[in-house]
């Protein structure tokens, strides 16, 4: 240890491994783990970094620190006893490791402060203060890989459909249909290529350590579009696939409505409208736009506006009727008075 600053005695190089493990620290750790498990189960915006499975594993380890004994069934011998209030270097390291992670989480979320963060609803659910929330990140990546696998299959099928559609003789004479089929083919091929690149390149970077993932996402957030560039990049396969389907539907519509007779068009036109309406239904429902509610609200607004207009017109008509009646009554009395004066006046002839 020569040359190491601060080392002057033998006691300085003694590793403090035999430390006393207070029982209250173990109890505090167990309560923190139970709180994290409860928060993870009951809240969709929990700030807990660990998944439910990881928290359960941590809780089982903490239980071993406080359990009285664990017996071996074969030999009926006690192979482990409680570590609390004893000098157990490994148990101290276990408790310190877990307490460090929980204390960092409490510090980052301003625990005990007036502005403490209670959930991640107002922030990024995955990237909170440029730090990865492991539980949500794992769930997000698993769902993303499952979606990418589905997009690969759909893009391959769409590419085969476009190529087969272009080989139909009736399509080869329709220039707009050919152009739309080309655009659909390019979108399907772009979706397939982007999906393969994301699975092969970006997915590898996103499965790295927490620091590397955080650095990658922070770098993405510094682009022109900000943090939105990351979800936009991940949604490219889905977006290109949707545009490919739209272009193919347009090309099919051109072939149907330009080369078919009046009977086929009269049958296909209502079916086409019904298909578009039914296809838009889940899109509108996902964005919380309900046609029935809109129509009901519109009818209710129209009813109350019409009722208010009728009441207003009735009030004005009644007012006009009352004023006119008063005026006619006064005019009639004046006429009667004039006539009576004329009748009662004596003649001087």
Image (spheres, rainbow, N blue to C red):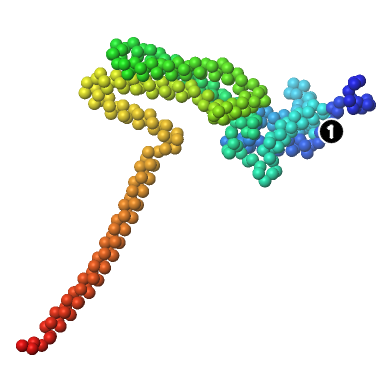
> Which x, y percent locates residue 221?
59, 29
Q: Residue at x 28, y 13 (%)?
A: 173
Please state which of residues 79 and 100 is positioned toward the viewer in this rendering: 100
Marker count (numbered): 1
Please state which of residues 70 and 2 is positioned toward the viewer in this rendering: 2
> Which x, y percent locates residue 256?
28, 20
From the viewer's perspective, is residue 136 above or below residue 310?
A: above
* Label 1 sits on residue: 20
Q: Residue at x 77, y 31 (%)?
A: 96
Please state which of residues 217 and 224 is positioned toward the viewer in this rendering: 224
> Position of 49 compared to 331: left or right?
right
Mark 1 is surrounded, within 10 Å at the Cα level, by few (under 14), some (14 to 19) or many (20 or more) other residues, namely: some
> Position of 272 compared to 200: left or right?
left
Look at the image and tell me whether residue 29 can be seen.
yes
Please state which of residues 108 and 5 is positioned toward the viewer in this rendering: 5
Q: Residue at x 63, y 37 (%)?
A: 38
**Quadrant placement of the C terminus:** bottom left
């Amino acid at each position: 240890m020569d040359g190491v600053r601060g080392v002057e005695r033998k006691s300085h190089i003694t590793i403090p491994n035999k430390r006393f493990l207070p029982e209250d620290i173990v109890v505090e750790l167990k309560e923190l783990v139970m709180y994290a498990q409860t928060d993870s189960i009951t809240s969709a915006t929990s700030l807990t970094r660990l998944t439910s499975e990881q928290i359960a594993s941590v809780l089982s380890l903490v239980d071993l620190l406080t359990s009285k004994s664990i017996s071996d069934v074969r030999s009926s011998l006690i192979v482990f006893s409680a570590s609390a209030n004893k000098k157990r270097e490994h148990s101290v390291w276990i408790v310190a490791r877990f307490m460090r992670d929980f204390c960092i989480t409490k510090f980052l979320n301003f625990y005990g402060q007036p502005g403490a963060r209670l959930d991640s609803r107002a922030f990024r659910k995955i990237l909170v203060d440029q730090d990865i929330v492991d539980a949500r990140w794992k769930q997000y990546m698993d769902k993303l890989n499952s979606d990418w696998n589905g997009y690969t299959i759909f893009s391959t099928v769409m590419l085969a459909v476009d190529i087969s559609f272009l080989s139909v003789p009736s399509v080869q004479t329709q220039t707009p249909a050919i152009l739309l089929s080309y655009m659909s083919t390019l979108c399907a091929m772009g979706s397939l290529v982007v999906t393969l690149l994301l699975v092969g390149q970006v997915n590898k970077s996103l499965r790295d350590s927490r620091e590397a993932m955080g650095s990658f996402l922070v770098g993405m957030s510094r682009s022109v579009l900000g943090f939105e560039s990351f979800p936009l990049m991940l949604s490219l396969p889905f977006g290109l696939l949707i545009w490919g389907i739209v272009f193919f539907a347009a090309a099919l519509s051109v072939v149907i409505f330009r080369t078919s007779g009046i009977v086929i068009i009269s049958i296909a036109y209502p079916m086409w409208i019904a298909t578009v309406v039914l296809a838009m239904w889940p899109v509108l429902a996902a964005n919380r736009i309900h046609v029935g509610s809109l129509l009901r609200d519109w009818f209710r607004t129209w009813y109350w506006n019409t009722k208010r207009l009728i009441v207003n017109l009735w009030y004005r008509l009644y007012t006009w009727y009352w004023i006119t009646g008063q005026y006619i009554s006064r005019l009639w009395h004046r006429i009667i008075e004039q006539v009576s004066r004329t009748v009662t006046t004596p003649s001087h002839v």
